[in-house]
Image (tube, grey):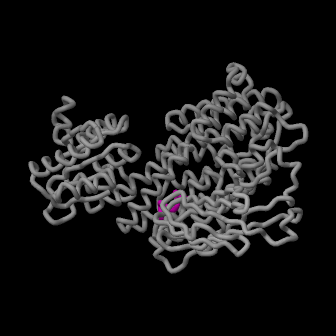
Amino acid sequence: MSFVGHIRDLAAARRELETRRLLVVGGAPDADRSAFLDAVAREVADEAGLPVYRFRVADAGDRSGEAGRTPGEAADAVVEACRGVFVVHPCVVVVDGVPAGAADAVPTGTADGSLLAGLISAFAESESFLLVGSTDAREGASALPSDGCADGWALLARAAVHCDRGDPRAAGPLLRRAVEAHQVAGDRRGEAWAVFLYGRMCRLRGRAEEARRLLHIARERFQAVGETPGEAWACGELARLATRSGAPDPDAFAEARRLHERVGDRRGAAWAHLWWTVARADEPGFPWREEFTNVQGRFHEVSDRLGTAWTLHHHALTLARADGTDGVGGTGGTGGTGERRREADRLFEGALALFEEADCPHGRAWTMLEYALRSPAHRFLNGEWAAEIRHVFHGIGDEAGEAWVDLAEAGPSPDGEPPYELACRYPTALLDTLGWTEAGEPLIPRAARDTQPEPRPGFPRPGDRDRPDDSRAHVRLTLLDDVPVPDVPARIALQVVPGPGHPWSTAPLPPLTARATSLGHAEIDPAHGVPADGAEFRFTPHRPGSHRLRFTVEDPATGTVLQQIEAEIDVVPSDPGPHRPTAPAPRPSARRA
């Protein structure tokens, strides 16, 4: 985001607007500022063929027929009016008359309460151009000293919402922009939260090593700036990573909860309490009923519907899987089983309603699946139950969730092996905890719903099983330097490694050519290398975020492409601290020509 303190020439402002799609103008009399905004809007609109919409904050109450509105109510009206216009289709939006006091009153760590931040939040994913005119600005001074920071916080808030919904795909672009905004503003605290959310996004996508590395970096940065709530959240996310291997760490959740409580973060403490309870819920003798009730009370106190929904989900899941020793129904016989099932149904229904209110399709799909599996009456009333759940998973790109629905429909395989679509995504240790009821229903591991893992690169497909792995040659990429940061070259080594049954294992490699291509905002040099001579490339990214590189191995004698692979490398913001951890090798994604 940019600020124009005093009116600059029209061409400079137009270039600024086209670069950032956002321009803030202040430090001029009302008539001059309005005329300048009109001129910029007209130039951009005429060339792009877009309509122009104008809003004045002072007119918001009159336009809606409600005189005497407070400034906050008028600001809300402007944001809602703009949301209805430029989210639908591209246009040029001019919002004038924004009081300087309202524009820069951005509460720390949140975008709520600021008219400018509200506009940015609504505008973040739009293709429209936004011009903002700020009044009462002191000449020669920045009327919006925190505008870059507000932009970053608004983007972080939107990215966090996408992660909460279980749709991490949309979070990546927002996080990249947030990192840039916080770096421009020099906000180390904002950078730390951006790195944390990157780690959380990687955990959701099943990229365990990347998530672990980024969350450790985030925790160190939180410690460096004294952000204890962030440190507690990072500890909780690291603990959730351990559950993916089928070995939850309740002590780590307990430590995160103590950190949250120490700084008075009741919401964070409630989430840590929930995951601690989930980690221990299947332990014999654990008082899970009491703990889930306590957690639900905590979430009610902070009005967290999403937390309440996941609490009801896991409470229902535990109740549905209980063996009759939980005290419901007295003897644990048929009557007790029926009562437990009815109570679980009520909890599943409550969770489903809350997930719908909170707009969380990830939680809704998992609750629909578990409800259908544990309640035959519910499932048989809807003959298309599996297709409906698959559709919700598909809407957020969760192919792993769809694979669990396929498993529920197909039942256990005769050889006891998990299907390919699950085996290629989840660790063996987690899939080993998959169980089956006597009725042939899957007891899906709790940790399966914590991630949406992508297929592991190089995992053999069923049709490849008759081709021994040792008869093939593989491409190995190694990151030779520390964690990549913007504008600093990092070395990448490429090797062709033949298996012991491959002809090249007993003869020198032929003079193959490895061609390197950057698929983002980065440079890679040289463009070609020879693996037999030890191919090494210099990767220079120009911004933080996830960068994709493509390597094509060719036989120049025949012009044949032998293999093409892609690698994703996470670039973190420049670390002001003296230490930088060592990065693991990038994770190549093999694609055969």
**Camera-side residue of 534 and 338:** 534
Q: Is residue 299 magenta?
A: no
| Vertical placement of residue 579 versus 555, above or below | below
Q: Main secondary structure of the magenta part?
A: helix
| Residue 316 image point, x, y percent | 67, 37
In front here: 569 or 175? 569
Identify which residue is drawn at 47% across, 71% down. Answer: 487
The quadrant in which residue 149 appears is bottom left
Q: Residue at x 34, y 49 (%)?
A: 120
Specify the farthest residue to the front.
Answer: 557
Residue 473 x %, y %: 79, 61
Instruction: Find residue 55 and report its image quarter.
Output: top left
**Does the image show residue 258?**
no
Would residue 237 be found to the left or right of residue 56 on screen? right
- Magenta stretch? 192-198
Residue 194 painted magenta: yes
Q: Position of residue 162 (x, y in %)?
A: 50, 46
